[in-house]
Amino acid sequence: MNDRMTPAPDQGLPAPLLAELQTRFGPRFSTAAAVREQHGRDESSFVDVNPPDAVVFAEDVADVQALLALAGRYAVPVIPFGAGSSLEGHLLAVRGGISLDVSRMNRVLAIDTADMTATVQPGVTRMQLNQALKGTGLFFPVDPGADASIGGMCATRASGTNAVRYGTMRENVLALQVVTAAGEIVHTGTRARKSSAGYDLTRLMVGSEGTLGVFTEIVVRLHPLPEAQSAAVCSFPGIADAVGAAIDIVQSGIPIARMELIDANTVRMVNRYSKLDLREEPMLLMEFHGTPASVREQAETVEALAGEHGGAAFAWATDPEARSRLWTARHHAYFAAIASLPGCRAISTDTCVPISRLAECLLESVREADEMGVPYSLVGHVGDGNFHFGYLIDPHKPEQRERAELLNARLVARAIRLDGTCSGEHGIGMHKMDFLMQEAGLPAVELMRAIKRVFDPQNILNPGKVLWGAAKQGAVRRSWATSAAMPP
């Protein structure tokens, strides 16, 4: 692990703060080891970071305000926690502090079918929201795979399989209620579809990974449910053939809803894990939305384009059970990879490049991984140039992590050289801070640091994430002796 990722020694919380937290939150405040451990793990490969010093379960905006006011008084870090499904160490307590669990803030506050918006609390999950929308003729399309919370999806600017048609969280969040580090409530945006009023604070907050404020209400766009849907799968002789077909499909203007690449290695893992019999070759898994006639027309056009690239065994299905079976397999690809090597963890990459450079980036990255003998899975939202390697390692063997991190660094450098990005949807967390500097450059990162200092001068909001050196050294772990003497 990079020495800058090494967690600070666990110093515990000051006694006066513990007493105030117990008084204010009662049984919703916990220092139990099991609760702390649960909130000190995500789906990343980091396993040697201490858990938070305590956990607070918030139930409303007043709880969030109260906790941040107390944390600010004692300069104690606060790490927002939703579903715990992040992949880059976003929620790890690298500098101790308090995990703020907002999963109980899980009410759908309003559904406006006329304006096609929903207002939700941050703990609402995407599946819960879509369940609440049943019967309205609307749905929320952003689908990162895991049943993530809407708050966490906002924090990481998530996207997923539907982004090629419906966009990411950036395009689907209209307004926010945010509690700042000082405990103040700020409203950004409105339910109007556009605005030219001042700085776009909503877009600044979406993707800030809990470092600028805590979301307490979120207004999202909804979309009409398509009249018809169909899923299609097509196998190819090689990855280059599959990517070539994907590029042709996008450039032809077909309004495809989802288009996923799964390499042969990952298909084998998925077959074992989900007990499927998919053809073990690189494949494209696609979905079409529209009228029954347009869906059929899209599938037939795609089949013809795929055939020009050696596509075989093209099959498509319109019944929900068959579609669900295919997409469940795709969404389980990460867990299938983890299950393929008991005890392993995945160092997950998340680069995105212009679609015209996708084949070049993918093929070179596959070649390097094969040459180094590092086991991996590969899936990609190839419709928008985003893909993921999962390099599988024993997290307790430094030499395996070193090889995987070297592959990851080379992949990111390659993506940036091809005018791409170090993260298409997972975010920066604690894993990609060096890569953000490489991509954005020092002047841009310094501007981000300045913004962070304005919003969070004590650096108490999820410190140690996104930006190195966002606040002055020592601002987070103020001496507990002096903190205890501070007035209430």
Image: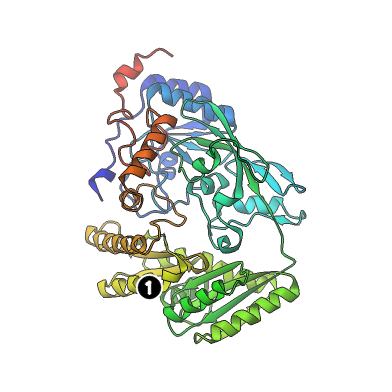
Q: Place residue 109 in its image quadrant.
A: top right
Q: Is residue 191 left or right of residue 424?
A: right
Residue 423 picture location, percent across and down: 41, 56
How crowded is the residue under tag 1: few (<14 C-alpha within 10 Å), some, or many (20+)?
A: some
294 up-or-down from 304: above or below: above
Q: How many marks?
A: 1
According to the picture, the residue beneath numbered tag 1 turns out to be 360
Q: Is residue 233 left or right of residue 223?
A: left
Point 55% across, 71% down: residue: 250
177 up-or-down from 427: above or below: above
Front position in the image: 251 or 180: 251
Mark 1 residue type? Glu
Q: Is residue 275 left or right of residue 226?
A: left
Front position in the image: 273 or 136: 136
- Quadrant of image for the C terminus: top left
At numbered mark 1, what does the secondary structure look like: helix, strand or loop?
helix
Point 31% across, 29% down: residue: 477
Tell me, what colour scheme is on the image?
rainbow
Residue 77 picture location, percent across and down: 39, 32
Point 72% across, 60% down: residue: 225
Q: Is residue 126 left or right of residue 98?
A: right
Residue 472 picture location, percent across and down: 30, 30
Residue 53: in sight, yes or no? no
159 up-or-down from 479: above or below: below
Point 54% across, 82% down: residue: 306
Residue 354 picture location, percent across and down: 45, 65
Residue 141: in sight, yes or no? yes
